[in-house]
Image (spheres, rainbow, N blue to C red):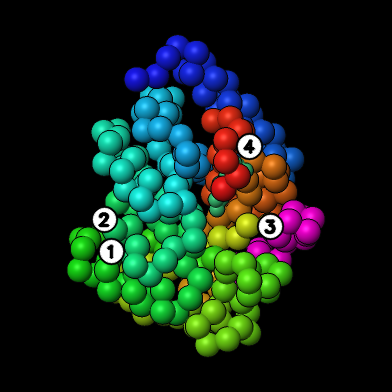
Amino acid sequence: MSTPEREAQVRAGLAGVRARIERACHAAGRDPGGVTLVVVTKTYPASDVELLAGLGVVDVGENRDQEAAAKAAAVSAPMRWHFVGQLQRNKCRSVVTYADVVHSVDGVRLAETLAGAAQRHRERALSVLVQVSVDGDPARGGAVRGGDADRDLERVAAAVAAAPALRLAGVMAVAPMDWAPDAAFAALAEVSADLRARYPEATMISAGMSGDLEAAIAHGATHVRIGSAVLGTRDKLR
Ligand SMILES: *Cc1c(COP(=O)(O)O)cnc(C)c1O
């Protein structure tokens, strides 16, 4: 159960973020209807998700399977669950049972494992974004243009597109710490345009977090993933 204090906090956080999205869209000459707010609820309880549902939020994001699976089972409101964290192949079977969108597919083998799990354990195709490494650093998550066989962006996209149980929906990125968000999201927009030339349905661009949603919207983000600016600062860094 939520307290009235918590509800007031979340309501205020949400109003602030919705206002930021509107202003950013206005500045970019974009229709705010073209930007979906995904509230990242990691570390926060299922009761916060119910609160968000009551405030009109449909899309919520999680980054760990164990936490997400339990929360999705505990929430009765009909949410769209976005899996935004690094995904291990042994978690695919679980993730496909509750996720509507997976933002973080960055390997050919991962795409194949996810496709197999989706084929066996769900009825509707699973929407998948290819996570792009903007700086090409293989140590962090993300597929890389011209990368090695498993992490090559083209091959990852092709593996997703070839799987009947997956739908290639677009791209996702996290701005590298040492890059200006503007430069990072401009690079992502280019990758997205390239991809759409070959896969016209791959229109989603998942970019922007609490600190950089304005830059992401300026560069065409269709989905922003916002945690702390709505729900408060998380205890642990994750
Ligand atoms: C936690 C997280 C977010 C949200 O981050 P905030 O800075 O709290 O808005 C967005 N994307 C991913 C992949 C995350 O793990």
Q: Earlier in the sequence, mark 3 or mark 4?
A: 4
Q: Nearer the viewer, mark 1 or mark 3?
A: 1
Give yes or no for contact between labels 3 and 2 (Cβ–Cβ under 8 Å).
no
Image quarter hosting the N terminus: top left
The residue where tag 3 is placed is 175
Q: Residues within 10 Å of mark 4 (few under 14, many from 20)?
A: many
| Left or right: 162 as drawn, with respect to 8 | left
Q: Residue 21's mark?
A: 4
Marks 3 and 4, how far apart at CA: 18 Å
Residue 210 rendering spot, x and y as whole percentages? 64, 40
Marks 1 and 2, how far apart at CA: 7 Å
| Left or right: 135 as drawn, with respect to 236 | right
In the image, what residue occupies the spot 52% across and 87% down?
149
Q: Earlier in the sequence, mark 1 or mark 3?
A: 1
The answer as to whether callout 4 falls within 8 Å of ligand 1 is no
Q: Residues within 10 Å of mark 2 (few under 14, many from 20)?
A: some
In the image, what residue occupies the spot 68% across and 72% down?
137
Numbered disc 4: secondary structure:
helix
Marks 1 and 3, how far apart at CA: 29 Å
The residue where tag 1 is placed is 93
Q: Earlier in the sequence, mark 2 or mark 4?
A: 4
Give yes or no for contact between labels 1 and 2 (Cβ–Cβ under 8 Å).
yes
Numbered disc 2: secondary structure:
helix
Does the rendering let one see residue 21? yes
Range covered by the magenta-colored residues: 176-194
Numbered disc 3: secondary structure:
loop
Hey, which quadrant is residue 116 in on the image?
A: bottom left
Q: Earlier in the sequence, mark 1 or mark 4?
A: 4
Residue 218 rendering spot, x and y as whole percentages? 71, 49
Q: Is residue 181 magenta?
A: yes
Give yes or no for contact between labels 2 and 4 (Cβ–Cβ under 8 Å).
no
Q: Residue 97's mark?
A: 2
